[in-house]
């Protein structure tokens, strides 16, 4: 465990099958609980001003609440237009009943967020 990990939220903050917009140090993140598997993506849609943390979950995809484009929650890749650019995501560590990430280690680079 590195000391760059920070607690983003409690596991109980995001019930199974749901998503939340969580802010950490002024930056919003979209947190997803897919039947106990947690994923953290950038909150901002790459196509427009929509919040993915406030979007609609369809199986393992998140639909942007602004224009209806979709992304894979597991990979960050766009799955439905008008979205064409992937969203950044972070590796999740579950510890002490909490969701931890390294905010400086996004898994998709080249995305301005």
Image (cartoon, rainbow, N blue to C red):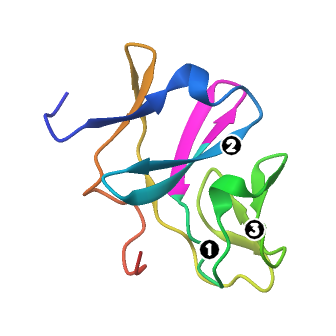
Query: Mark 2 or mark 1, which has the lower sequence index?
Result: 2
Which residue is denoted by mark 3 in the rendering?
64
Which residue, as the protein is rendered here, is positioned at the far front? 26
Distance between mark 3 and mark 1 Cα atoms: 7 Å
Q: Does residue 26 appear to the left or right of 48 in the view shown?
A: left
Contact between labelled residues 1 and 3, with CB atoms less than 8 Å apart: yes
Which residue is denoted by mark 1 in the rendering?
45
Tag 3's secondary structure? Answer: loop
In the image, which residues are magenta? 32-41
Q: Is residue 76 above or below residue 45?
A: above
Distance between mark 3 and mark 2 Cα atoms: 12 Å
Which residue is denoted by mark 2 in the rendering?
19
Image coords of residue 105 (percent x, y): 28, 56
Q: Is residue 25 above or below residue 33?
A: below
Instruction: Using the rendered view, name the quadrant where residue 9 is placed.
Output: top left
Image coords of residue 36 (percent x, y): 65, 24
Image coords of residue 96 (percent x, y): 37, 13
Q: Does residue 57 appear to the left or right of 27 in the view shown?
A: right
Instruction: Using the rendered view, name the quadrant where residue 107 is placed.
Output: bottom left
Query: Mark 3 or mark 1, which has the lower sequence index?
Result: 1
Residue 54 is inside the magenta segment: no
At 59% from the left edge and 80% from the top edge, which residue is drawn? 46
Asked whether 79 or 46 is in front, the reply is 46
Tag 2's secondary structure? Answer: strand
Mark number, residue 68:
none
Distance between mark 2 and mark 1 Cα atoms: 15 Å
Q: Residues within 10 Å of mark 1 (few under 14, many from 20)?
A: many
Number of dots carrying numbers? 3
Q: Is residue 102 above or below residue 99?
A: below
């Amino acid at each position: 465990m590195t000391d760059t990990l920070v607690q983003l939220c409690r596991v109980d903050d995001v019930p199974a099958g749901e998503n939340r917009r969580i802010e950490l140090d002024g930056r919003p993140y979209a947190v997803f609980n897919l039947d106990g598997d947690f994923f953290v993506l950038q909150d901002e849609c790459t196509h427009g001003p929509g919040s993915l943390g406030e979007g609609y979950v369809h199986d393992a995809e998140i639909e942007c609440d602004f224009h209806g484009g979709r992304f894979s929650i597991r990979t960050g890749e766009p799955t439905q237009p008008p979205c064409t650019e992937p969203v950044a995501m972070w590796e999740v560590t579950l510890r002490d009943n909490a969701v931890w990430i390294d905010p400086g280690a996004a898994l998709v680079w080249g995305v301005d967020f």
